[in-house]
Image (cartoon, helix red, strand yellow):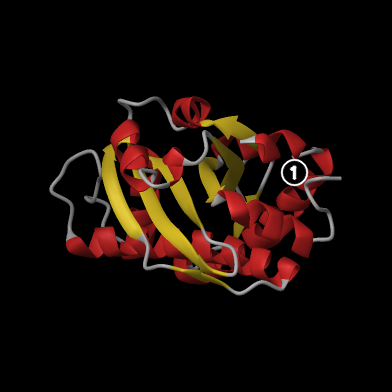
Amino acid sequence: MSFYKNIKTIHLDILKEIGNIGAGHAATALSSLLNRKIDMKVPDVRVASFDEMIDLAGGAEYVAVSVFLRIDGDAKGSMFFVLPLEQATYFVQKITGDDAFSFTTPPCSELGLSAMQEVGNILSGSYLSALSDFTGLNLYPSVPELSVDMVGAMISFGLIEISQLSDFVIVIDTALKEMDVSANEAIKGHFFLLPDPEAFQIIFRSLGVPLNE
């Protein structure tokens, strides 16, 4: 789609700023949930092809945890948050206090799955809330869907509709860590933001930076 070619550094800088604000909100919510101080940042935002997106998530056959939601309202789209199994397991163990829980040894308890879904809900909802505040648009997330599957299968299932319209996504890197650990121990995940094609114009017009300039 031609409008992707019009996305410039200024657009990505704005999305990164929105991402960092959303990350701040998410860190506050996660700190309360985990009862420990969490720092969260967005080190990079970029446009990528579907193939690049799958590679970033570990590859088509790599098994990961994903939270998927649809965005409804003034600017429709889709959002994925993808984490490696080990790092998703860490979150669930910290939240539930169940050190025996692991996504690598199914079946997983319903409590653990619900906890991971809540983490995904907090992270995705915080970013979407920041995007809504910045743009003044009404954006509503669907109930998040948690999946544990191969990356190719998860993303293909969620993108059946939009993949007929476009081949590109916005990648929002995230890095989470406890305040008292080193940056090398940060948990790294990816948001994949996929506004429907018409939603790109709506979002950037609301930010005062139309894509055709």
Closer to the camera in the image, 21 or 140: 140
- Which residue is label 1 attached to? 12
Q: In the visual, does 151 lie left or right of 164? A: left
Residue 68 image offset from top left, x and y in percent: 39, 54
Question: Which amino acid type corresponds to the residue marked 1 in the rendered image?
Answer: Leu
Residue at point 42%, 27% (across, down): 58
Residue at point 67%, 35% (across, down): 2
Closer to the camera in the image, 156 or 181: 156
Kindly give the residue lying farthest to the left in the view shown: 107
Residue 59 image offset from top left, x and y in percent: 39, 25
Residue 62 image offset from top left, x and y in percent: 33, 28
Residue 127: name its quadrant: bottom right
- Judge whether residue 156 can be spotted in this image: yes
Using a 10 Å C-alpha cutoff, classify the residue at mark 1 as few (fewer than 14 neighbours), some (14 to 19) or many (20 or more).
Answer: some
Closer to the camera in the image, 115 or 201: 201
- Judge whether residue 85 can be spotted in this image: no
Residue 137: name its quadrant: bottom right
Residue 105 image offset from top left, x and y in percent: 17, 40
